[in-house]
Image (spheres, rainbow, N blue to C red):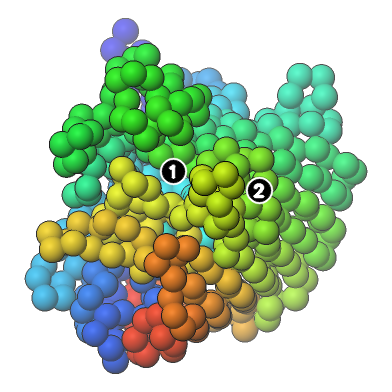
Amino acid sequence: MGLLCIGILAKAQTDISFNTSIESMVSSGESQAFWLTHNQLGKYPLNNKANHLLAFEGKARINKPYLGPLSIELGTNLIASYSADIETQVNEAYAKAFLWGWKLEGGWFREKEYFSGLSSTNGDLEKSNNARPHPKIRFGTNEFIPFLFWKNWFSFKAEYDEGWLNDQRVVMGTRLHHKSLYTRFQINPKSSFHVGLNHYVMWGGLSPNPNIGQMPEGFKDYFVYITGSPGTENFPQTDIANVAGNQFGSYHLQYNYETKSLGVTAYINHLFDDHSGMELENYPDNLYGIHLQFKQFKVLEAVVYEYLYTLHQGGKVDVAGVEHGNDNYYNHGVYRSGYSYQGWMLSSPIFSPLVYDENNVVTRIENTRIIMHHLGLKGKFNDAIRWDAKLTYTQNYGTHNRPFDPVKNQFFSVVNAHYSSTLPFDITLSLAADRGSLYENRVGSMLRISRTF
């Protein structure tokens, strides 16, 4: 039997790839430029004038290991960095299995990249690749799959995650639940329309507040959390009066149009922080975006423009002596480290900066009321030289309870040039600049040398 299994595995189609890179970064300020370090899986130390990094990434994809439809993927991403000290971290370590359009994933793994990598937040306010991946298990579809006999015009994709925020935070041992459902309507061969819903819950863990202590984590409690229900008698009073845990999410609308020469995607991402947001009482707050792909024009291959508005947050009004709105996105009274992990926002990096206590633990997100204009560009001059750029302007208002006065304006920019040709390695040169009153004025540069085997 053992020889038979070895023979079957030997006939599997296996793709193995390795990538190693060396990077050096330098800044004119006391910390690194924004777009050099954000949306980069949290792999860079921030508060240093110079950083040096060695990275190793390996991935193996085993297709049809038992001559069936199953595929298995294993991967890792290891980082060693030097600035003031040497630091090592495992950014990714995962195993994935794919079968009949479904997937099961476990470990530390990044999210799939959309919109040519030019979006400020991967087109999804809650699901960016800004922070280091946290450990989780995910079951879902591998992109859209047809639904029953409507397969020519209706398909869906879905995910169900359970994760663990195992960093140093106010509520230690916080769990993170996520589920999503997206539907796609194929209008005609060129056009489709997507509708989606994401739901997140931060739950469980041990609070330092003696009036709260250990948050409920039992089997029955779990269903209270994931259904968005008010807490029962063993929950804190705030959860009984509202909903259990830190609940938030987003609606997603998207339209796609494809021809041989042009691809157009327009999308709206509406975030909510409570039931009033789910009922669209915070209707002005959205991320609007458009992604253009020029399939026959290489100097400029892709463009992304995004507009973000989050000033409303349900308003700040008083009705019969009760304050409504004042949602304060991604912050929470109990889960005070907010929607962050390892000192990085899990959502869009534009929601920043973070505030730390004397023990270097995140205690809140200082700035969530924002207007943003973001432009991303990508193309190539020839087969050897590719380029991309991001330009972002934000007006930052702080929060309803702690407003910035005056409003802080900020500009972020980066240009990357990639060379890959006759040399035995690839070269990337990046130049970035930040200017404004939210962060220090600074100019940064990075040189990366990489090799894929």
Question: Helix, strand, or loop for circle 1?
Answer: strand
* In front of the other: 21 or 311: 311
The vertical placement of 88 against 228, above or below, is: below
- Residue at 53% in and 77% down: 394
Going by the image, does 203 lie left or right of 306? left
Between circles 1 and 2, the one closer to the viewer is: 2
- Residue picked out by circle 1: 15
Quarter of the image with the N terminus in it:
top left
* Residue 151 percent across, percent down from the top left: 79, 27
Mark 2, Cα crowd under 10 Å, few <14 / some 14-19 / many 20+, is: some
Question: Helix, strand, or loop for circle 2?
Answer: loop
The vertical placement of 54 against 202, above or below, is: below
* In front of the other: 452 or 260: 260
The kind of residue tagged 2 is Glu
* Residue 138 percent across, percent down from the top left: 44, 32
- Residue at 24% in and 69% down: 45
Residue at mark 1 to residue at mark 2: CA–CA distance: 50 Å
Q: Quadrant of residue 427?
A: bottom left
Q: Quadrant of residue 51?
A: bottom left
- Residue picked out by circle 2: 281
